[in-house]
Amino acid sequence: MRAAISLIVVFAACGGDESDYDAETNPQGAVFAVSMLNGFAAASTAGSPDSVASGAIQLGSATQNIILPVYPEDDESDTVSARRTGPGVAYLVGTCACDAGGCEFDGCADENGAFSIDGSVSIDGETYSWDLSIEQSQGDGEDYAVETSMSTSGTMTISATLIDGSSEGDGHSTITTTDPDGDRTTSLSWDWSMAAHAIELDATRCAVDGTLDASLSADAGSADFSGSGTVAFGPACGEAVAVE
């Protein structure tokens, strides 16, 4: 079975309790999010446990493509960046089962211990509801290690012509690097939300009407970022604009 779980947290080290940067809304990130929602529904219908869990978790990554920090041109701050991606191919152990009513995950894990999934996805007609948590470990075992906890929940109606509903999630990562000067540990935390409002799909499942709200906040101890925005779709496939 395939398992691919990714999340990106990128912002510059600055300081303060409020957002250190303004935020901008990326309409094409919202277009991509619609594609991810369509893929999540397709994976659920196909009964693919790893693709279902991956699709739900990656909504957080999609949100980070919609709400972006605006860096000043002369900003010389250090950048904190973390990317976590599960193995391209993995065999799952534990309870990882899907049927027409949804999926159940109980200690569902990569046999090598790279990640584990718990929770469930339920399917009621064209309505998908989920509550999932994932623990993930990465690193080379010597000078780089990442421990990540993520969770997400939501309820979405996803049909051939409509997407409507909301989802949210949060996560925390501890990144440890080792060099001749010793160990360095960086902690990252984030939370996000996404709400689809009567997004109309054309025959190719491309958004041609409706709106999507997204919000994101992230904290690396000495750096903070938060922002939110709304994107309106249509009237043609691929057209999307940020709503002021």
Image (cartoon, helix red, strand yellow):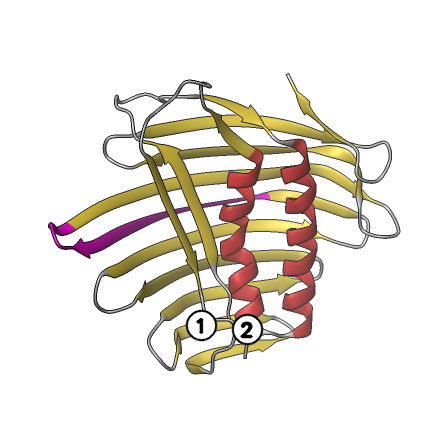
**The residue tagged with tag 2: helix, strand or loop?**
helix
Question: How far separated are the C-alphas under marks 1 and 2?
Answer: 8 Å
32 vs 108, left or right, is right
Query: Is residue 128 or residue 65 the one in the foreground?
Result: 65
The answer to whether the residues at label 1 and label 2 have Cβ atoms under 8 Å apart is yes
Q: Tell me the residue at 43%/65% (across/down).
A: 119
147 vs 170, left or right, is left
Q: Which residue is mark 2?
A: 49
Q: Tell me the residue at 45%/23% (across/down).
A: 71
Q: Tell me the residue at 81%/32% (across/down).
A: 234
Q: Amino acid at mark 2?
A: Pro
111 vs 33, left or right, is left
Of the two numbered discs 1 and 2 on the same chain, state the one appearing first in sequence: 2
Q: Which residue is mark 1?
A: 105
Q: Quadrant of residue 62?
A: top right
Residue 50: give x, y in percent of width and height: 53, 71
